[in-house]
Amino acid sequence: MAYGVSVLIFCLGVCISAGLVGYVIHGNKKYKITVPGKDEEEN
Amino acid sequence: MEVFISAPLALVIVGALSVMLLSFGFFIGKRIKKNSNDFLYAGRNVGLALSTATLIAAWVTGNTTMSAPEQGYTIGILACFGYAVAGLSLCIFAPLALRIKKIMPHGCTSGDFVRCRYGKAVWIVFLLISAWYFVGFLMTQAMAGGILLQSLSGLEYHIGMLLIMVVCTVYTLKGGLKAILSTDFIMAMLILIMLLVTAVLAFFKFSPAMVYDGVMVNKPELMNLLSGVGIMYLGSNFLFATGEIFHSNIWWQRIYAAKEKVTFRSFILSGLIWTTVPIIAGSLAFVAVAQGYVVPQVNMVFPIVVSKLLGPAGSVLVLIIIYSALASTVSSVLTASSNLLVQDIYKRAFKPNATDEQVVKYVCYTIVGMAVVTVILVWNQPASMYQVLYLTGSAVAATIWPIAMGIYNSRVNRTAVLVAMICSIGLGLVAYFSISSYAAPVVSALVGLVIISVGTKLSPDNSFSFDQLDEQVSAISNK
């Protein structure tokens, strides 16, 4: 298999992964979802 | 084949661990209420420590302890890092877990979400993917049980394979998820401590510098940070692991079992702690290369290296580590898969008025059925555990975008999701056979992303609202 194909798969994999991480973080910001804090835990 | 501990000693150790597991199963089984909430979700009240430990134990599988060294031995140093990024997949699921808790607090399975979000056609494809993955996953764990005992004590492959499946099935049947969560805590501690002890002892005997020099003499290509297969594996493994986690009911079941306030932190913590496991286990493969150990099968690298390095004590350590990892994973997969199949097929499709007792009864039947199917499929031992698992790569990666977009975007086009899942699997399999097994998850995820994005842009679905999702789920769950 050509080395170029391996590089292409690697680059695609990294770009899709980065896009997914960005999408999920942006999604939680959009819906204002925050991690329950300690105050909430005590309640 | 070289034997490191006697067969009776291996059986005594496995027997002791099995007795501990079964006792827990019977002990918890007597204390849980026989309803699905207690049996399948541990009362939906699990705290941070237990939730984190069960996530670690479920994700430290026979593959982590046996395939990570296999990958290190065959691909090289990049494979250790590539394997470790699967821990980050648990971390990236943390924000999704929070969102799932918000929009569907009364959910039961990942299938519930898919059915209510996208309709029956997508749900059927999703269930087929889940069944495919669960069977592939269970196959690798059962194989690992057989290979483990065979490589350490010379016991026939079928004995170890049957032992792990029978013990885990009985203990899961008795205690349900509550027993699994309790033993997972002990298993996670055992795995992490024993693995650390093993690595410290191994690298105390052979310093990292000696190992590096040995690898550079015997197989220098393993240290190549630009190897073609290595970079491809590094680029694809995050997507494969993310697909495994996003769609699998193992993780959804744990979201519903945990308290809302601990969900996010438990996924982040477990992901970060988990990343150390494949790096430590994988690095031991380089000792085998440096020392020129003969490894009859690539799957056997880890047990053989530790046994050669540390003698019979090492064999005992490795037996405890891998058996614990296998037991926690097999029982988790058995409950999660049977829960998904019974809740989604038996209850939703055939008997909506089924009582709680009937659901638990059918879950138990399904657990036994899954175990039997697995044993039949791995009776003739496949060559490589990891290749068996990676065959599911195109299918699990096909679920990444439907789950992620379905959770955050109310306008996702349902038809586009159906087409995307089918095309992702098809083209992913083409990539698996024509390029490399590691190309499959990347191609699958890319196809899914393009089709769903374009389909949604051209024809957005305006009929869905997240506000109604929990009601719909509750309605189909008969709550």
Image (spheres, rainbow, N blue to C red):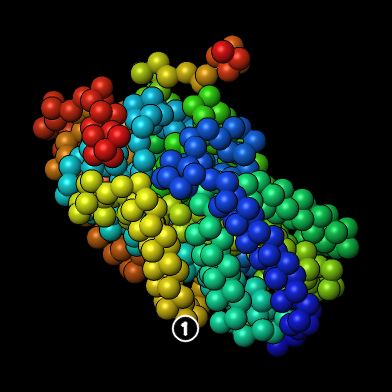
What SS does tag 1 mark?
A: loop
**Residue B135 can be seen, yes or no:** no
The residue at which mark 1 appears reads as B380
Marker count (numbered): 1
Residue A31 falls in which quadrant of the image?
top left
Q: At 38% across and 57% down in the image, what residue appears?
A: B361
* Nearest to the observer: residue B328 or residue B179: B179
In the image, residue B8 above or below residue B439:
below
* Residue with the most extreme left position: B459
Query: Along the horizontal axis of the image, is B290 left or right of B462?
Result: right
Camera sees residue B257: yes
The N terminus of chain B lies in which quarter of the figure?
bottom right
Q: Residue B100's quadrant in the figure? A: top left
Q: Amino acid at mark 1?
A: Asn
**Residue occupying the point 30% across, 34% down:** B479
Residue B194 placement, left or right of B300? right
Question: Which residue is at the front of the view, B38 or B120?
Answer: B38
Residue placed most toward the observer, B231 or B123: B123
Quarter holding residue B422: bottom left
Chain ID for label 1?
B
Q: Position of residue B15 (x, y in %)?
A: 70, 71
Q: Residue at x 59, y 61 (%)?
A: B327
